[in-house]
C-alpha cells in the first residue's frame, strides 16, 4: 500500500486529473507543503476528534493534516474531479481520511464526525463569508460543537473578522465573529503561493468559540441590527437604525449611546444592547 510520504507530487495529480482550478467554485490551490503544514499545526493537537476540511482540492492541506497526526479528517468537496484525485490519498491514509461529496453550505457541520471538532480549511473565496456565518449559527446553537477553526480568507475579509471598534475594517462580520469567538489573524500568504495565483493576499485566521457569548443577545436579531447599522455606515446611528427603531434617537439615549455616533464607534456589547432592545420591543 502507498504511504502518505510516497504519494505523487500535487502538480502531477492536478495534471493527471485535469484539475484546472474553476473560478465558479472559488478554487485557488495551495501546493506548498511548508505553508499547508503551518496551517495544519495552527490547529493544535489533531490526534482526537475529527478535523473537517472544506474544499480540499487536490489535497495539499489534506496531506499536511494527516502527516501532522490527524486521527480523522473529513474532506467536504463539491467538485467530483477533486474527489477522484483525493482517492489515492484516502487509500494511503490508513482509514483516517473520509471523503464527503456535497455543498459545504448545506452540510450541518455540528453533526459531522466526533467531538472535539475542528475546521481547518483554505476556504473557497466565493462562499467564505456565508460559510463562516453558518458556522457561527452552529456555535450559537451548540457552543461546544467546535473546538476551533483555522480558516483562510482573502486578507480583506480576515481583517474584517478580527478588527476592533474604531478600525476602518470593523463591521458586521467583526461583531458577529467576536461576539461568539476569540479571533486572531495568524499570518498572510502571498498570491504567488497559489495555483492559479489570486489577485489578492490571503490570511489565516484562528477562531476559538467562547464558553459563552460576550453579552446577551439573539444572533438573528444581532444580525439585523448590525446589517442596518453598517449598511449605511457613513450615516449617524439615529438615521441608519430608523428602519428598526422609529424612535432611534430616543432608544440610543436610553442605552447611553450618542445618537450622532456612527456604527464603527460602537463596541460589541453596545450592539448586543441594541439587539436586546429590539427583541423586547
Image (cartoon, rainbow, N blue to C red):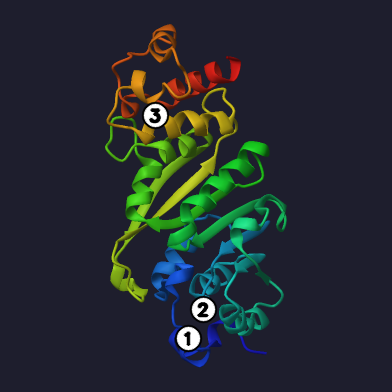
Residue linked to disc 2: 58
Residue 47 makes an appearance in the image: no
Is residue 10 visible in this depiction of the protein?
yes
Left or right, 142 with reference to 65: right
The alpha-carbon separation of the residues under discs 3 and 1 comes to: 45 Å
Q: Are marks 1 and 2 in contact (CB under 8 Å)?
A: yes
152 relative to 246, above or below: below
Identify which residue, 37 or 235, lies in the foreground. Answer: 235
Q: Quadrant of the N terminus?
A: bottom right
- Label 3 or label 1, whichever comes before in sequence order: 1
Which residue has dot 3 on it? 229
Measured as percent of width and height from the top left, residue 272 is found at 50, 23
Q: Position of residue 121 (x, y in %)?
A: 51, 61
Residue at the disc numbered 1: 14
Name the residue rendered at 50%, 87% in the picture. 13
Counting other residues with Cα less than 10 Å from the Cα at mark 1, is it few (<14), some (14-19), or many (20 or more)?
A: some
- Tell me: residue 160, above or below residue 269: below
Which mark sits nearer the N-terminus, 1 or 2? 1
Q: Secondary structure at mark 2?
A: loop
Q: Judging from the image, what secondary structure is the residue with disc 1 in?
A: helix
Q: Residue at x 67, y 83 (%)?
A: 91
Q: Gap between marks 2 and 3, in whole Å?
A: 41 Å
Give the quadrant of the C terminus: top right
Numbered disc 3: secondary structure: helix
Q: Nearer the viewer, residue 200 or 247?
A: 247
* Numbered label attached to residue 273: none
Residue 83 in picture, x, y percent from top left: 61, 78
* Distance between the alpha carbons at the discs numbered 1 and 2: 7 Å
In percent of the image, x 37 and y 25: which residue is there? 240
Amino acid at each position: 500500500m502507498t504511504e502518505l510520504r510516497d504519494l505523487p507530487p500535487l502538480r502531477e495529480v492536478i495534471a493527471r486529473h485535469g484539475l484546472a482550478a474553476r473560478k465558479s467554485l472559488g478554487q485557488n490551490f495551495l501546493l506548498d507543503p511548508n505553508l499547508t503544514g503551518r496551517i495544519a499545526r495552527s490547529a493544535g493537537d489533531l490526534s482526537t476528534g475529527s478535523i473537517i476540511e472544506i474544499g480540499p482540492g487536490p489535497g495539499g492541506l489534506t496531506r499536511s493534516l494527516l502527516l501532522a497526526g490527524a486521527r480523522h479528517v473529513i474532506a467536504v468537496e463539491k467538485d467530483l474531479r477533486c474527489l477522484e484525485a483525493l482517492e489515492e490519498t484516502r487509500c494511503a491514509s490508513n482509514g483516517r481520511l473520509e471523503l464527503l461529496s456535497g455543498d459545504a453550505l448545506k452540510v450541518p457541520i455540528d453533526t459531522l464526525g466526533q467531538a472535539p471538532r475542528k475546521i481547518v480549511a483554505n476556504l473557497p473565496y466565493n462562499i467564505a463569508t456565508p460559510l463562516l456565518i453558518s458556522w457561527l449559527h452552529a456555535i450559537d446553537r451548540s457552543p461546544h460543537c467546535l473546538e476551533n477553526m483555522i480558516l483562510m480568507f482573502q486578507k480583506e475579509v480576515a481583517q474584517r473578522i478580527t478588527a476592533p471598534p474604531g478600525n476602518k475594517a470593523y463591521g458586521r462580520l467583526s461583531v458577529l465573529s467576536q461576539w461568539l469567538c476569540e479571533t486572531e489573524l495568524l499570518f498572510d500568504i502571498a498570491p504567488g503561493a497559489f495555483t492559479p495565483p489570486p489577485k489578492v493576499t490571503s490570511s489565516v485566521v484562528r477562531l476559538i468559540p467562547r464558553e459563552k457569548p460576550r453579552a446577551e443577545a439573539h444572533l438573528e436579531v444581532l444580525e439585523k441590527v448590525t446589517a442596518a447599522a453598517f449598511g449605511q455606515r457613513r450615516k449617524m446611528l439615529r438615521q441608519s437604525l430608523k428602519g428598526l427603531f422609529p424612535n432611534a434617537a430616543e432608544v440610543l439615549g436610553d442605552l447611553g449611546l450618542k445618537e450622532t455616533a456612527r456604527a464603527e464607534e460602537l463596541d460589541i456589547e453596545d450592539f448586543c444592547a441594541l439587539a436586546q432592545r429590539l427583541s423586547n420591543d
